[in-house]
Image: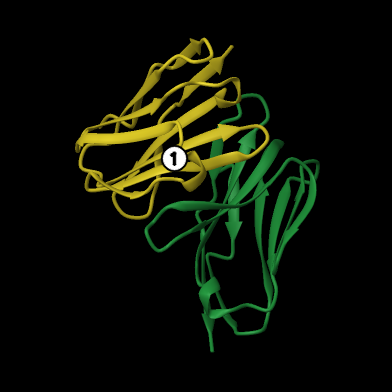
Chain colours: A yellow, B green
Amino acid sequence: DAGVTQTPRHEVAEKGQTIILKCEPVSGHNDLFWYRQTKIQGLELLSYFRSKSLMEDGGAFKDRFKAEMLNSSFSTLKIQPTEPKDSAVYLCASSLRDTLYFGEGSRLIVV
Amino acid sequence: GDQVEQSPSALSLHEGTGSALRCNFTTTMRAVQWFRKNSRGSLINLFYLASGTKENGRLKSAFDSKERYSTLHIRDAQLEDSGTYFCAAEHTNTGKLTFGDGTVLTVKP
């Protein structure tokens, strides 16, 4: 079985651009999470979907971050407009019960 | 082999008491993070440490990269502290996270 697939693996954006990150969860998993990983804060929850329904939207990240799950096998995270402080690794994870399966992450650099 | 060993796997406390969770690492890690799984299944960040200790309310965490361990201390446990706690360690070179297997904490009246 394929694991969690994230694209692109790397992205460089100019300040103010719109960035869309993509995630394909493990087939059959009901839960999908978006996390941001930085060296300062570690892992921070951005969004959480259960059976395609948004369960948590990460509070502080509502402003310029929007995650969508158009179908059970695909999710996007849109950052609009990007700012330099958004530079981080964005991780997607899925789970069926308790175990989280993480993707390799999308490394975003905003200049 | 497993690079993060979390213990205990289950812990039962009476209200008002305290205990510690521990994660041992088989290799040097550059940082550790402690999470609690909330009622919806999301991992909520408790602490992120690159060294030393941090304290937040009734929780305190320590990380010793050289000795390859981290601890999460809970004092004056409350019923609402019940849940599953995870540690996750960042590998020094890659930054990739390796999670412990979790500790199921049950706080009883």
Residue B25 image point, x, y percent: 66, 45
- Give amino acid for label 1: Lys
Q: Number of callouts in the render? A: 1
Q: Position of residue B107 (x, y in %)?
A: 54, 79
Dot 1 falls on which chain? Answer: A
- Residue shown at 48% from the left, 39% from the top: A61
x, y percentage for residue B59? Answer: 69, 65
* Residue A74 image offset from top left, x and y in percent: 24, 31
The one nearer the camera, B99 or A62, is A62
Q: Identify which residue is drawn at 66% across, 59% down.
A: B22
In the image: residue A14, left or right of residue A62: right
Of A50 and A62, nearer the camera is A62
Q: Is residue A36 above or below residue A49?
A: above
Q: Relative to the observer, which residue lies in front, B37 or A98?
A: B37
Inspect this view and state whether residue A16 appears.
Answer: yes
Quarter of the picture containing the N terminus of chain B is top right
Classify residue B93 as left or right of residue A24. Answer: right
Q: Is residue B108 above or below residue B44?
A: below
Q: Quadrant of the C terminus of chain B?
A: bottom right
Quarter assignment of residue A87: top right
Q: Secondary structure at mark 1?
A: loop
